Image (cartoon, rainbow, N blue to C red):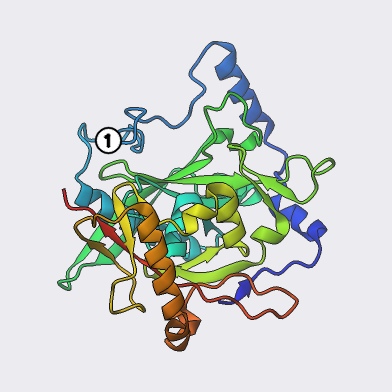
Amino acid sequence: MKFTHLFALSSLLLPIFAAPEPPAEAIEAIEERAKFGGDTKYFHEPGGNDELGHYDIRYFKGTPVTYEERGDTLLHLIRSYLTVFREKNVETWIAHGTLLGWWWNGKIMPWDWDLDTQVSASTLTWLGENLNMTFHNYTSLNEDGTSDTREYLLDINPNHVERIRGDGQNVIDARWIDVSNGLFIDITGLSETNPSTQPGIWSCKNFHRYRTRDLYPLRETVFEGVPALVPYSFDRILTEEYSARALTKTMHEGYVLSLLSKQPTSPIFIRSILTKHSQTQMDARAKRMGQARTHQLQEITPSTRPRTAQRASGRKPEIRITEFIARTMK
């Protein structure tokens, strides 16, 4: 992987991350709306549970999509988003559960309902001034050689100018929405909200905090078959958000992590009947198999394996073992 935007001094990052002064008219509009008891929430969903809480209400068709349609929609959501942002030279990187999916095998986790990305506060401002409420067409190729053109809306929450949580109704700064069914990517901004007391700490409005050195320089990689960026210390970020267990446990949401595939260089999601092994037995088995395969995987196109950060000390980067995810059959 190659590094992008290497900054030697944290002071150089101030123009990138620090939120610019919000326009006076934007602040006035937000305050007026709240003063008269109006709904302060910008994005709305048809419900609050996992099934209904991940659709934009403007494009929700009344019933949730099927499991297969959801997977297909999320796949093209992230491919279109990353492609369009790269074409427009807008810096963004994958985050949260989406980053965890990349860590395991460069794909969306099969139980995910939506996707998460991040941008800097200054990027949010630029998006709001130049691309807010714009529609984007993306053509995808099917396995049979045919193509489909899909349409997406980039909607920037006007409350993005407020870089603190406030009443908690607007922690999402923007969305990339599939207008055919309302599924979306949540986009959140990062800024240095307390530079005097917490210099070099960047946060979103949902209390996620990051150190400068953990974010930058961003790493070039591939996610769902298209170029993408991930934070420099992705392993540290994932461990702090989800615990080290999330990077090793072999069972989650009815899915089982398996090392039984004979093609370790081609990680894919596969459906399988859940074995009767307990979580502890599965963990022990994965550890034994992982140790046995370490040398083998290092010899098979090691440059394609996701790596932990290579520090200035010259330590040889560790090559992870990609495990396969098997879904239980109902």
Q: Position of residue 17 (x, y in %)?
A: 69, 51
Q: Nearer the viewer, residue 93 or 109?
A: 109
Q: Nearer the viewer, residue 25 or 111?
A: 111
Q: Quadrant of residue 232?
A: bottom right
Q: Is residue 106 left or right of residue 23?
A: left
Q: Residue at x 33, y 76 (%)?
A: 266
Judge whether residue 99 can be spotted in this image. no
Q: Quadrant of residue 101?
A: bottom left
Badge 1 amino acid: Phe
Q: Residue at x 62, y 62 (%)?
A: 233
Q: Position of residue 21 (x, y in %)?
A: 73, 39
Q: Quadrant of residue 98?
A: bottom left
Q: In the figure, 191 relative to 285: above or below? A: above
Of all residues shown, which one is farthest toward the top? 36
Q: Is residue 306 left or right of residue 200?
A: left
Near mark 1 (Cα within 10 A), the count class, few <14, some 14-19 or many ≥20, is many
Q: In the figure, 301 relative to 278: above or below? A: below
State the residue position of label 1. 60
